[in-house]
Image (cartoon, grey):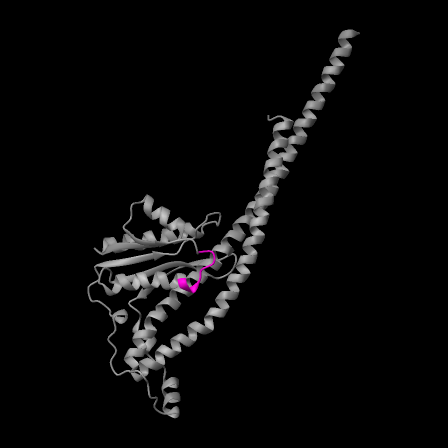
Amino acid sequence: MASVQDLKRRIRSVRNTRKITRAMELVAAAKLRRAQTRIEAMRPYAATMQELIAGVGRASSSVRLPLLETREEVTNVLLVPLTGDRGLAGAFNAQVIRRAFAIERRLLAEGVGVRWLAVGKKGRSTLSFRRKPVVGDFVGFTDRPEYANAQAVAHRAAELFTSGEVDRVVLVFNTYVSALTQKVTDQDVLPISPDILETSEAERTEDAMRGDFIFEPEPEEILARLLPVYLETQLYRALLESAASEQGARMTAMRNASKNAGELIDSLTLSMNRARQSEITQEILEVVGGAEALA
């Protein structure tokens, strides 16, 4: 059995750890609220962007743009896992990497090559350790992404796609559901689905009532400028979802760690009291034994 001093030392250490986990939980909760606010602010912009692209698409008779090109034979796929720069977030990073590797195995079984674009230090280190063909990495912003970060990632992915080095780009990230739940999502971002150019019957009726629009420059040119922005918007939204998911996962993990620390402190305190009682009992027996020897 451990001595009373050893148990006191362990209790002190666990209490200090619990202070850290509680502080990290509070910080993650504050960051989560900010991330939720940014997601809510992003949604109207994303919806308006999609409506704008659909409106321009209605005015275009034929659309043949590089980002819309669906290739008959897919020989290489670019996987873009969105991970965090730090750990201590439960299964947040592991489940993204696990899904990405599952997609890789399926593609390789079909005879399709796979390349990687790492976002986040955790993903980059895992891919480097496994010697995967990484064509780029972006780190240092995953807990608070800016639109410029999404632009950089989107530009690199679009560059690889338009040059023909890859034929598809798949994004793997955590979608924020709640502080307790993050859903792993894989989404094809390139080629951009032509469905965004399609319109509903209600929208066509509304356009007919408004009359014809005159576009300057031509709708095809406008669409060529809008599609890269749409790709950036999709990536920025995914980065925001991932950031909120990371803070939610970290808050939950630190709360569980604090709870486990409390239970461990209770268990160690009970063991310490038993050890102390045993020492006192031993001392009493020694005193009684000494008194009997003197008598």
Corner quadrant of residue 67 = bottom left
Direction from residue 73 to residue 21 in the image, left or right: right
> What is the x, y in percent for residue 128?
32, 46
Direction from residue 153 to residue 85 in the image, left or right: right
Q: Is residue 127 visible?
A: yes
Q: Is residue 79 or residue 215 the one in the foreground?
A: 215
Q: Residue at x 32, y 74 (%)?
A: 225
Q: Does the magenta-highlighted stretch encompass residue 265?
A: no
Query: In which quadrant is the C terminus drawn?
Result: top right
Direction from residue 252 to residue 146 in the image, left or right: left
Q: Is residue 267 above or below residue 279?
A: below
Q: Residue at x 65, y 27 (%)?
A: 275
**What range is drawn magenta here?**
142-148
Q: Is residue 187 visible?
A: no
> What is the x, y in percent for residue 186?
36, 60
Q: Does the magenta-highlighted stretch encompass residue 144?
A: yes
The kind of secondary structure the magenta stretch mainly shows is: loop
Query: In which quadrant is the N terminus drawn?
Result: top right
Q: Is residue 135 or residue 169 the one in the foreground?
A: 135
